[in-house]
Amino acid sequence: MASRCWRWWGWSAWPRTRPPPAGSTPSFRHHLSTQEKTLQICVVGSGPAGFYTAQHLLKQHPQAHVDIYEKQPVPFGLVRFGVAPDHPEVKSYGAEDHRALEVPGEELPGVCSARAFVGWYNGLPENRELEPDLSCDTAVILGQGNVALDVARILLTPPEHLERTDITKAALGVLRQSRVKTVWLVGRRGPLQVAFTIKELREMIQLPGARPILDPADFLGLQDKIKEVPRPRKRLTELLLRTATEKPGPEEAARRASASRAWGLRFFRSPQQVLPSPDGRRAAGVRLAVTRLEGVGEATRAVPTGDMEDLPCGLVLSSVGYKSRPVDPSVPFDSKLGVIPNVEGRVMDVPGLYCSGWVKRGPTGVIATTMTDSFLTGQMLLQDLKAGLLPSGPRPGYAAIQALLSSRGVRPVSFSDWEKLDAEEVARGQRTGKPREKLVDPQEMLRLLGH
């Protein structure tokens, strides 16, 4: 999930107990006497990978003390900022950047990444001023994964169905004024290669007030091919096939006929250019290359046929993948793959430094994948500790960070500070029947804390 890089800090004796720094959680507090030696570990990032790693280390090494550092004034990373507000049970997404389309016109107004759009409606401070223009009739999402489906669902869900979620007040206001009626999700390959899961697809098919648009021609010959694919993929493709080719029952037919909005999947299309409006001031469509598939299994790839197709739209959202950013010049980073070079989580050529999450393995998997991955990285650290491969001797740990921040006049946000912000968000949400009303302005957060 979120990119995580963390270092073992060495042994030290703490003279007193203290509250954890920003991003720690109450269950991670270990009260230590001056006689107890502490395995000090620094975790950078308070998303799923960071917390799962800390959890494993604390469970396996009772004398460990984990400090979790977070750049935002609130913890939990993309568990807070990357989850669709109407799917609070889904804790997925991660990495701090998106992959560029690298096509002409992607800099035009009306084009943005799905990651930024998700951050906007979830209250990520850096995206709070995105102001997407939803005055158009048609939106195109380039990508066919769960994030793409999440964005399409938020665009098409009746606003009154979002009122009781923790979507931000500003985003809900914009969605109330939205004129988007049709959303296309475009993919380079075919139905057998979509990256979303059956749960999300089923919900889209049954979305109130919206109907699916699928071309039966895209599914010709699939009935025989799906016999050989793994069961999860088979069930997913069968649902797509039924939706595209079978006549719906009377009740479903009536529901679709009355729907005022629609969403569709466009297969075998690769973006070549974002087309400008006549005055050149904003996006007005996407030029797509028609593709065909070559290869079999995992090696299947889309190649252009030479044909082109223009798809008119006023909003283009790219959901073609996530990408981690370099942590620091001192930390190795593979810019092409978007990962820190590592062996089972051990950062190459930097003893005592480890990584987990998407910065370790690339942008794949969901929360369960990250949990397992983080546990494995934590285990590698403990193995290295037991084998005597880690630097020994006392190290200052948080005391050094605290002194550095103090010398710079920086007052960090503590976990107890976060608890105050949490209480304020919950109180604001209760006034309107929401689980919380997220604070999105860091300066407002600091004012509430008296910083």
Image (cartoon, rainbow, N blue to C red):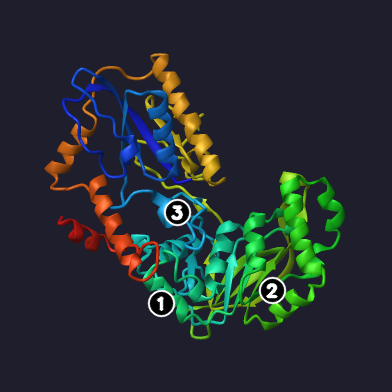
Residue displayed at 43% across by 52% down: 78
Image location (x, y in percent) of residue 174: 43, 77
Image location (x, y in percent) of residue 51: 40, 39
- Which kind of residue does numbered mark 1 sit on? Gly
Give the side of residue 390 with respect to residue 150, left or right: left
Q: Nearer the viewer, mark 3 or mark 2?
A: 3
Give the side of residue 225 with respect to residue 231, left or right: right
- Which kind of residue does numbered mark 2 sit on? Glu
Q: Residues within 10 Å of mark 2 (few under 14, many from 20)?
A: some
**Visible in this render: residue 104?**
no
Structural distance between the alpha carbons of marks 3 and 2:
29 Å
Pointer 2 residue: 309
Mark seen at residue 97: 3
Image location (x, y in percent) of residue 81: 41, 56
Structural distance between the alpha carbons of marks 1 and 2:
34 Å
Q: Which mark sits nearer the N-terminus, 1 or 3?
A: 3
Residue displayed at 19% across by 33% down: 400
Q: Which mark sits nearer the N-terminus, 3 or 2?
A: 3
Image location (x, y in percent) of residue 61: 38, 23
Structural distance between the alpha carbons of marks 1 and 3:
26 Å
Q: Secondary structure at mark 1?
A: helix
Q: Secondary structure at mark 2?
A: strand
Mark seen at residue 173: 1
Q: Quadrant of the C terminus?
A: bottom left
